[in-house]
Image: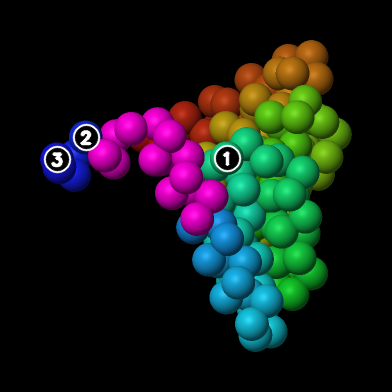
Amino acid sequence: MNIKFLSSHKYLQSFSNKLITIVFLLIISSRVASAQDYFKLGCIEQDKANLDLAIKDYTKKIAEDPTFTKAYINRGLCYQDKADFDMALKDFKKAIELKPGDPAILMSLGTVYFHQKKFKEALENLEAGLKKSA
């Protein structure tokens, strides 16, 4: 049977994602999970739109390594997707503190400020992000 057909079939893709998650959870439960494991699991959950689970995993990563910028960014994006803009702003501010001038973080800050109707701050961050990315 054609493998491309099988891999593109939505049911099999869904099954595959579930299987990957189960295998990953088994690996984590069979040993002490590292902070990086929690970050990877958070990414998997975020990709599946399980935002609350992703937030918990990113929080565990941050507890183990409070300087890991990507965990703050991803958790901020989860909060943003949940329309919890105050929490998203808190994470993006911490991320920009850890990685000053990062264009993607500046753009994320601008987006959150826009949703909060803080248009001056939104414009400042969006323009700064665009300048830095050019």
Q: In front here: 71 or 23?
A: 23
Residue 96, above or below 103: below
Tell me the tag on residue 5: 2
User: Decide: marks 1, 3 in contact (CB < 8 A)?
Assistant: no
Residue 109 drawn at (x, y percent)? 67, 34
Residue 28, position in %: x, y? 63, 75
Counting the numbered discs, the total is 3
Looking at the image, is 31 positioned above or below residue 85?
A: below
User: Which residues are the magenta region?
Assistant: 6-19
- Residue 117 occupies which quadrant of the picture? top right
Tell whether position 7 is magenta. Answer: yes
- For residue 40: magenta? no
Residue at position x 55%, y 66% in the image: 24
Label 3, on which residue? 2
| Front in this rendered view, residue 118 or 48 | 48
Which of the two marks, 1 or 2, is nearer to us in this view?
2
